[in-house]
Amino acid sequence: MKNIQKQLIDLKIINPEAISLLYPKVRDNENIPVMQCEDSGVIFLKNNKHISKEYYSSKQGYEYWESKREQALKKQANDDKRRLNDFRNEIKGKIWMEIGGGIGGIVEMAKDIYKEIIFVEPQSEPRKYFNNKGKQTFESVNDVDRNDIELATLFHSFEHFVDPLNTLIEIRKRIKKGGKIIIEVPHAKDILISYFNLESFKSFTFWSEHLILHTRGSLSRFLTAAGFNNIEVYGIQRYPLANHFFWLKEGKPGGQNIFTDINKKDFNDQYEKLLNKLDMTDTLTAIAKVPD
């Protein structure tokens, strides 16, 4: 039994008697089945042996993002702006550790807001970029030798961890009492999976790097086991209704750029409220504290 499945069972997040095959493969590897616990709804890969210790650190330049840094920043700008808008008050004046920071778009946007940044990213090129700007950068959380962090963020990185529980414990050790952690991850109960059971979307979205697709319950359980408290988990919807219409009509992404007449903020806000009430958003956010 591989580490991910064992941790999920040990934490009583999934029931070993309720595990079944959800999909035979991920989009980039035909030999990795996608499993689901029918009781909890948590989705996970049957094995994670393909993610070695050097998997991310061995990437060269910006090849992981398939584009130059400027182009990658533009692609991620909407998410970076949303996160900064949502968490500006949490970041303001804080010693902030951004974990799995990627190309660091939100770090640059917030450069006049935070007190100090600790940028953790296994890929060397983004670290080199921030090193040249005089920022503290580290390949791993384990390399960070301090315990005064006031805020730690993991925006779409937690689902990549081979050892999620112990990584969370190491993060918690570096956050001061009363400090916070914010985690954003893909949601296992995304409406296109859980309600529509859309073949084209499953073929597109399941990926060898996403080792777990979380539920509200699984995120909360990991945080509790790692020693956090005051846990709040809620849904957000990254992709608008126009995107979903196109998936249902054509089985392809990008509908927000095609059905532009209905891709309106008020419309999307109401859709997000509905999906949140149904617990079927595409994304989950968790906020928790280190006990005082």
Image (cartoon, rainbow, N blue to C red):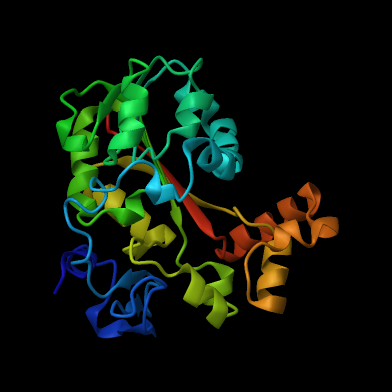
Residue beneath the point at 36% across and 79% down: 25
Q: Residue furthest right?
A: 261
Q: Position of residue 175 (x, y in %)?
A: 26, 29
Q: Position of residue 177 (x, y in %)?
A: 26, 26
Answer left or right for 190 relative to 213.
right
Figure label count: 0
Q: Is residue 242 visible?
A: yes
Q: Nearer the viewer, residue 209 or 34?
A: 209
Residue beneath the point at 36% across and 48% down: 157
Q: Nearer the viewer, residue 68 or 137?
A: 68
Q: Position of residue 165 (x, y in %)?
A: 21, 52
Residue beneath the point at 22% across and 36% down: 139
Q: Nearer the viewer, residue 274 or 206?
A: 206
Q: Quadrant of the C terminus?
A: top left
Answer left or right for 93 relative to 61.
right
Residue beneath the point at 36% across and 24% down: 130
Q: Quadrant of the N terminus?
A: bottom left
Q: Is residue 156 visible?
A: no
Tell me if residue 277 comes above or below residue 123 in the rendering: below
Tell me if residue 57 comes above or below residue 135 in the rendering: below
Find residue 98 and report its image quarter. top left
Q: Position of residue 27 (x, y in %)?
A: 42, 72
Q: Nearer the viewer, residue 81 or 216?
A: 81
